[in-house]
Image (tube, rainbow, N blue to C red):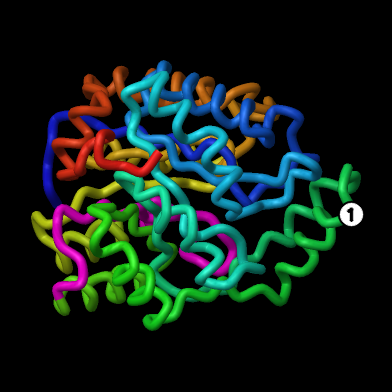
Amino acid sequence: MSSSNKVIITCAVTGSIHTPSMSPHLPVTATEIEEAAVGAIEAGAAIVHLHARDPADGRPSQNVGLFREFVGNIKQRTAGVVNITTGGSSTMTVEERLQPALLLRPEVASLNMGSMNFALFPMLNKYKSFRHKWESEYLEGSRDFVFRNTFKDIEYILASCSGNGTRFEFECYDTAHLYSLAHFLDRKLVEGPLLVQTVFGILGGIGTHPDDVAHMKRTADRLFGDQYVWSVLGAGRFQMPIAAQAAAAGGNVRVGLEDSLWDGRGKLAETNAAQVRRIRGILEGLSLEIATPDEARAILNLKGADNVAF
């Protein structure tokens, strides 16, 4: 694992995992997403991972025009690294999911490293009332969701963005995804330093036990050696414990309302910045230093904000 004495905080500002009815604090409109991202960066996040939503009903959207309403303003107002999803949602084609990253040419884009059962329906046990009809239908439908990212799909995304200078946040939800990434590294379709985001706590992926975290790190160490930068995200209530474990072991961290709506037991996070401040307190309590956006760019060998298309 590539080592640094600086910890990179990524903040996933909004996404397709949580629906608007689950928290009144989830940013939906372009202005809300912009303000949330700026606040997270000001609180200490070096990277903001961004989805877009239809402002009418909060439905996940890969409409490039919606992204344009906030990514340029975030760039102008901060030094933060903008990371655009290619994940979108399970209901979209790979061509739809790719468009924002392809056309906006960000410094970083996310890339799921395999197809998986992506089950969100257990949330229906906690939430009974929804503002929009699509929300409960979307969660119930996840009993039969397969998030598709085949080897052909991944090759398509990598090839399409190969001339953009965009690097990837490789989202790995299980051990097999690490082996899939190693396959693309062996074929020289990707190159280090790889930002490997190991994801814990999504039903259909690896669990949240400390042994699961250690297992993913050991596997990545063996497969990638010093060619990767390790980061973690824990879903829901496991966000902070997993981040703390990984940071103590030399890893980087991702927080944000895409991954968890909470800021402590039973308390909804009112902002993304609140979660950034909470993990920053944990990191500084471990005597770790927080990477600035430019330090993150150096660690990850990014092309710089002047070379994006927004």
Q: Quadrant of the C terminus?
A: top left
Q: Residues within 10 Å of mark 1 (few under 14, many from 20)?
A: few
Q: Is residue 143 left or right of residue 269?
A: right
User: Between residues 8 and 211, which one lies in front from this camera angle?
Assistant: 8
Q: Which residue is at a point 76% across and 29% down the rendered structure image?
A: 24
User: Between residues 248 and 80, which one lies in front from this camera angle?
Assistant: 80
Count of all numbered marks drawn on residues in the image: 1
x, y percentage for residue 266? Answer: 70, 29
User: Between residues 292 and 102, which one lies in front from this camera angle?
Assistant: 102
One can see residue 166 in this view: yes
Q: Which residue is at a point 59% across and 63% down the rendered structure image?
A: 203
One can see residue 208 in this view: no
Q: Is residue 181 above or below residue 34?
A: below
x, y percentage for residue 187? Answer: 16, 79
User: Callout 1: helix, strand or loop?
Assistant: helix
Q: Which residues are magenta?
A: 188-213
x, y percentage for residue 250? Answer: 21, 40
x, y percentage for residue 33? Answer: 58, 31
Taking the magenta stretch, the answer to whether it contains residue 198 is yes
Q: What's the amino acid at mark 1?
A: Lys
**Which residue has dot 1 on it?**
133
Q: Is residue 182 above or below residue 173?
A: below
Q: Which residue is at a point 61% across and 61% down the rendered structure image?
A: 89
User: Between residues 226 and 49, which one lies in front from this camera angle?
Assistant: 49
Q: Which residue is at a point 23% across and 53% down the rendered structure image?
A: 165
Q: Is residue 280 left or right of residue 149?
A: left
Q: Is residue 113 above or below residue 42?
A: below
